[in-house]
Image: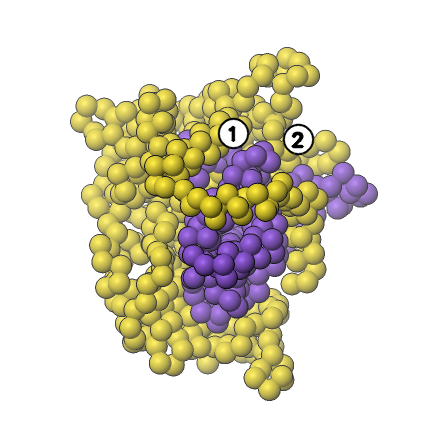
Chain colours: A purple, B yellow
Amino acid sequence: MGAPDEDRFARLVHEHSGAVGNYLRRRLYPLSPSDLDDLVEETMIVVWRRIDSVPTDAELPWMLGVARNVLRNARRAKNRRSAVESRLAPAPDDASAEEHVIADESMRHALASLPDDDREILLLNAWDGLDTHALGVYFVISTNAAAVRLSRAQHRFRELLNETQVR
Amino acid sequence: MSDLSDRLAALDPAAHSPYEARNLDEMISRIVASSPSGAARSAWWQRVQLRLAAALILGTALGAGTVALLQGGTSLAPLAIQTNVARHPGTFSTTEVPQSFEETNFVLAATLTPSSPQSPSFKLSIPPHSAREALRLASAFGVVGAVHRRGDDWTVAGASGASLDYQTSGATPQWYYSSTTPKVAPATASSSVDVALPSHTALNRDALGYLKRLGFDYAVASPVYSESTLSTTGAGGAPVSLGEEEVSYTVTVHRVDTDQTVSFSVDAHNALLYAQGPAFGLGAATNYPLQSPLAGVNALNAMERSTLSGPAVGTGAAGPAMVHAKITSESISLATFRLRNGTSWLLPLYTYSGSVAQKGGPPAAGTWSEIAIQPAYVRLSPAEARSVLNN
């Protein structure tokens, strides 16, 4: 590895470690800060080893794809995978109206009812800010396919939300 | 979607406490100076895994089944369950229960079946040659091209731009067909349509025709139809709208619902836009003994007691908060699990429905799941747990 690689790696770490950490936190929640640091570092080790493979036009989604695999490894290691996987944070305490709390519960229920693939792409877009091009890089599919999948997920989510609110 | 996006963003666990790295330069130096050797990395990774496993003590009810070990009767081969990849059930298994650290006490609000039902388990037959399977599936959709592999994903892209993705990372491989329409990523989707779409009968007929061509062992049931309009921006910047109709089915095996789904959608001209589903065949049925639905509730409670430390239910302020879940009904289905030996199975699963009282609000609906196989045959062995951990 030469200095340019090191410089690029340092830039990637500084620019994207926050997004990678947030990605991991969202999906392994709650998690201690030290565990989170370890998982971020594990992701960055892979990034360093494969620095030549990081696409210049899609660095973050590529790195999140690495983080996804790190999560898979972590989950394979777990006895009870359900405990530390992402759970939605409790509704903010400042919810001023009961209606707001109910609305949040509707969201939780709708999310829970979504197929896994739909939920993953929906939250990658809503929480991690990946657009359709980035989603394509993340899932290793075409932008068009990513766009269609996202659209499906949004559509199903809206329908589930409506069902929940009608109940 | 903007309103929903805002509401989703409000639920972001990282929004209120974003990740803050401690010392990035130190980490960079450490990584660059010594990319860890295989042995060193293994030890380091094991440390992470052990810490994660320790954190798992806060498990939820469904965790009982996710890495359980079926000891097995003398006539049955033991099943060492590694994951339920298909459903990721633990992620949101009790989603409407608002707190992460609550202890749930399950009580019956209805009479559940005291006897044990019959519901066999099925070993799944997964296509051994993924590239070949991707090409076969692509052919069924009229997509002809070379297959490209990236990790666990195989993609066949036709000259027209239509593509077939075949993903093998889960317990059951999944296929995704995508047409070339719309050519530009849709920006929004609404549930209202202003164009005439094909009839449900026509869509159902065509979807079943595709499934027949795909040639899987499973059946489908419970079609759900929906219509929507995809809105996007065309190549010249002009708005483009596309009406679509979708049908989604539950995959069934021997008339029992599974956790798998299949869906197809078409445009106003009945051209296929998108389709997805699982790729598996069925092995022989195996009758592992099941517990009764009533016993399954007791197993849920036992799991709660064993996974949450602290005082017994309701005995003091130092323990986790406690909520009462009233179980009102149960159903049995088949859920996809991957075993430690790499095989995938459909195993019977009880899903209990009920409600949980909430502070300052109406009761929240909830569902909880438990593997239906008898607890006497399902237990977590510490030795095996370590074995799983060190994989």
Q: Which amino acid does the dot numbered 2 rest on?
A: Ala
In the orientation shown, which residue stands out farthest toward the left? B75
B313 or B333, nearer to the observer: B313
Disc count in the image? 2
List x then y, in percent, for residue A30: 59, 36
Q: Residue at x 64, y 33 (%)?
A: B99
Q: To which chain does the residue with label 1 belong?
A: B
Q: To which chain does the residue with label 2 belong?
A: B
B42 or B359, nearer to the observer: B42
- 3D distance between C-alphas at marks 1 and 2: 27 Å
Q: Residue at x 70, y 44 (%)?
A: B16
Q: Quadrant of the N terminus of chain B?
A: bottom right
Does the image show residue B206?
no
Q: Nearer the viewer, mark 1 or mark 2?
A: 1
Q: Residues within 10 Å of mark 1 (few under 14, many from 20)?
A: some
Q: Is residue B240 left or right of residue B123?
A: right
Q: What residue did someone put label 1 on?
A: B55
Mark closest to the chain's N terminus, 1 or 2: 1
Q: What residue did someone put label 2 on?
A: B357
List x then y, in percent, for residue B344: 29, 44
